[in-house]
Image: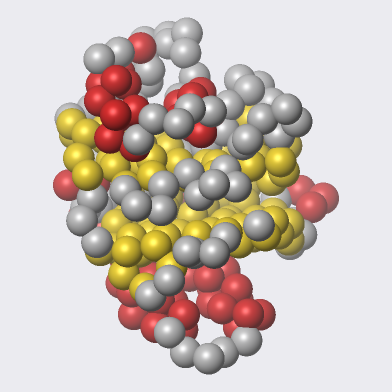
Amino acid sequence: MCIVAFAWQLLDQLPLCLISNRDEFYARPTAALKTWPNSPIIAGQDLQSGGTWMGVTATGRWAIVTNFRDGQDQTQYTTSRGELIQQYLSTDQSPIRFAQALDKHQCDYAGFNLFVGDRQQAVYMSNRGEAPQVLAHGVYVVSNGLMSEDWVKTQHLRKRFTQEFLPMLQQNIAETAICAAAWEVLEDERKVIPQLLPETGIRAEMEHLLSSTFIQSPSYGTRCSNLLRISSRGLDWIEKSQQGARQGELIQIQI
């Protein structure tokens, strides 16, 4: 399902600073963060459908997708939302041109929220009610509803991201402290009280389980956490495994 928070064009020399969690069934086969062979893409990979939930290129193109949760939609889609990231990162289209082209066949996919960008422009769209829009500078947070809905879950992450994490980036502190702060925010298991949960067509017990930033259950939960920074000079992406034999392992790619 996933959740993402990022600062866009807010920090000097750092167009993008992004943190995210990827939530998925533990049994779904996945490859960790890597440079894909014969491809410009740097990303983890969903080995079941072949796409990815988040990716970048060495030139500073980036994209991330979250599922739009709709328990009433029982349609079987033949196209994977993970292909959207792969498609964008494999082209040289501007973010807005890519989103506008996708808008014409968005119904081929299950519900999604999509961010695509480079160092100069960032665009958001959803095929469940949000047309492509170029983002102004600011902080953006999305989980599994529309960005405009601003669930309590996203409000909580926004507060911690802006008040606890971002100020640290403007201080002269150790890299290890910055990473620790990112994981502290992303590993928050506080759940939303039942009266404030969204209604997405799933059971109330499941809605409650999914209401925390960090999700844990016997079969489904947060698989990895990410800290991505794209600067005017390069990029730095750290992925932290949150599940299985690799739990706690860090993979870092710097370009």
Q: Is residue 231 above or below residue 41?
A: below
Give residue 169's position: percent from left, percent from top.
46, 80
Residue appearing at x 25%, y 15% in the figure: 104
Foreground pick, 216 / 128: 128
Q: Quadrant of the C terminus?
A: bottom right
Tell me how the rendering is colored: secondary structure
Q: Residue furthest bottom?
A: 172
Give residue 139's position: percent from left, percent from top.
29, 63
Q: Quadrant of residue 67?
A: top left
Left or right of residue 175: residue 108: left
Residue appearing at x 34%, y 52% in the figure: 120
Looking at the image, how many numbered discs can be counted on the residues?
0
Give residue 171's position: percent from left, percent from top.
47, 89
Left or right of residue 219: residue 250: right
Left or right of residue 43: residue 192: left
Q: Is residue 87 above or below residue 169?
A: above
